[in-house]
Image: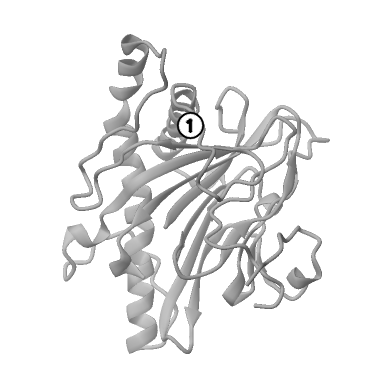
Amino acid sequence: MLGKLLYADDPIFEDYYTIDTPGIVYVWDKKAKKVVFAVRCSTADELSEQEYVSFCSLFMHLHNDSKLHAAITNNGTVVYGKMWGLGWRPGFDKGYDYGEYAKSVGVSEDRWKVLRNKDEAMHTFYGQRYASLAPAFWHAQKLFNVENKAPFFGHDYLEDLEKDEWAFASNLTFIKSDNKGRMLIAFLNQVPCTNL
Amino acid sequence: MFGIWALVDKQGNWISEPRNSQEIPMTGGFFYILPYKIKIDFAAQPYAIWELIWRGKEDVHATVDGKMAGNLDWFGTSAQTSKKLL
């Protein structure tokens, strides 16, 4: 089935439910009886000082790292903008392991090592952000299933799950708008169709 | 999938508040999940951190075309996560 690219003003979006305020929202699929989506929107004043600094460091780190890698041109998802494969390729099995994607030809080892020395801290913070949302996600699922009550907004690991079940990051990508200021169309697992 | 989005300048600095009262950093460019008809309107909170967990292989999803102010980027990063969660 051939699809067509959708733009922001396409009528298909007129009856979409819009999430546009700070907070956490979970989406519950009644038919599947499970939570299928979660979003957390945090303004700067809602973050701790450490979180604020860590986010700044993460963005700066990935911005700098993107200069040491060639942009991805062939994964079929980017229409506008730029995408890189960065970060920590292994790690899905253990969560704390990480590796790096290859650097571009011509990047000096010294320049490369400066960023690689920061990888562990970046990886850890990234994991913490995921881990602070994922258990709440899972807990929301549990509460919906068992009690049908409001979701739990927690940050604790759940004791009845193995830590590896929260393992993340088989890879990490970094995307930006292109030189015309256009944001990308990415994370696209198939071309959306109006007749779906 | 787990993803993080935020507004950054061309040097990689997070822009967490307006730099002037006239600033319109971005227009359009929302993320959507087609099967559930949900839009995540990044432009409504452009100075916030947006973090999402979604079913990357199951649900049709994308970020639609948007426009940035000339000296800014819309940053996005994602990691594949354990399927056990979803």
**Is A183 situated above or below B72?**
below
Mark 1, residues whose alpha carbon is within 10 Å: few (<14), some, or many (≥20)? some
Seen at 23% across and 49% down, the residue is A95
Query: Residue A135: horizontal and vertical position, in percent?
Result: 32, 64
Place of residue B35 in the rendered image (x, y in percent of width and height, measured from the top left): 58, 76
Q: Residue furthest front?
A: A1
Q: Which of A77 and B35 lies nearest the eye of the viewer?
A: A77
Q: Is residue A17 left or right of residue A67?
A: right
Subunit bearing disc 1: A
Q: Which residue in the structure is indicated by mark 1?
A: A56
Residue B36 at x, y = what percent? Answer: 58, 76
Q: Quadrant of residue A133?
A: bottom left
Label 1's element? helix
Instruction: Please state, as top left, top right, bottom left or bottom right, where the N terminus of chain A lies in the image.
Output: bottom right
Residue positioned 68% across, 31% down in the render: B72
The type of residue carrying mark 1 is: Cys
Counting labels gives: 1
Give residue B65's position: percent from left, percent from top.
72, 50
**Image quadrant in which the C terminus of chain A is located:** bottom right
Q: Nearer the viewer, residue B27 or A174?
A: A174
Q: Quadrant of residue A115?
A: top left
Vertical placement of residue A23 versus A82, above or below? below
Q: Is residue A21 left or right of residue A135?
A: right
**A28 relative to A124 in the view: left or right:** right
Closer to the camera in the image, A189 or B73: A189
Query: Residue drawn at (63%, 42%), measured in percent from left and top?
Result: B47
Residue A151 appears in which quarter of the rendering?
Answer: bottom left
Q: Is residue A31 above or below residue A85?
A: below
Q: How is the rendered protein coloured?
A: one colour
